[in-house]
Amino acid sequence: DTYTPTSDHPTFALLGVAAYYAKAIKTDTLSNLIHFEFDVPDAFLQERLPRSATGGEQLIMRLPHNLPNRLAGNWVEVVGAIYGLKQSNAIFAAGFTKTMGSITHGPHTAPDAAPFHYSDPDNPTLKCTIPMHVDDGQGLCICKRIYDDRVKHGLTQRYGDMTWRAEA
């Protein structure tokens, strides 16, 4: 399976931002609203390639002779998702969904795995929504603590240094 759900950023920008601003005004949390974007670096190189993704077959490739690596020119087994492999997008999406489940401490229940939602268990008015477009996320949080401690910390811990752009 190579399908990966994505969200439409312009649609989210219009509808999502309007809904979150309305909610923030209604709950008097406008000063806590954070609109953010991020990019997962080398997204398709982050996950292992399970044999189930190749129909149980071993996948091999020959590395270019001019590759600056000791394996240059050799045949190697492909053990991770790589750019250009049709399964890589779906493999990354599955791994990202699992990561988001660990960040939100619960299974992801949104249809088609995008967008991701989190509500603080102690105060359900504190929310965060993150739609994804492949490896680019754009989200809104009505709580700086959720943004810093859950989203930013959790994703950076899993994927390393990331490019973040946040507007409070």
Image (tube, rainbow, N blue to C red):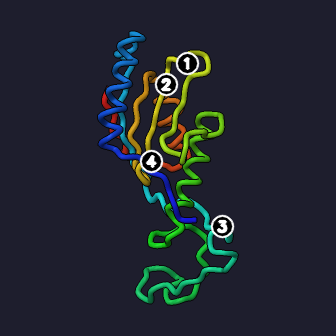
Q: Residue at point 45% right, 72% down?
A: 84
Q: Are marks 2 and 1 in contact (CB under 8 Å)?
A: yes
Amino acid, disc 2? Lys
The Cα atoms of the two marked residues, 3 and 2, are separated by 34 Å
Q: Is residue 121 above or below residue 36?
A: above
Residue annotated with mark 3: 50
Q: Are marks 3 and 4 in contact (CB under 8 Å)?
A: no
The Cα atoms of the two marked residues, 2 and 1, are separated by 7 Å
Residue annotated with mark 1: 124
Q: Residues within 10 Å of mark 3 (few under 14, many from 20)?
A: some
Residue 151, horizontal then vertical, whole percent: 50, 35
Q: Residue at point 67% right, 79% down?
A: 57
Q: Residue at point 40% right, 14% down?
A: 29
- Label located before the other in sequence (4 or 1): 1
Q: Is 161 left, or right, of 100 in this rendering?
A: left
- Label located before the other in sequence (3 or 1): 3
Residue nearer the viewer, 30 or 166: 30
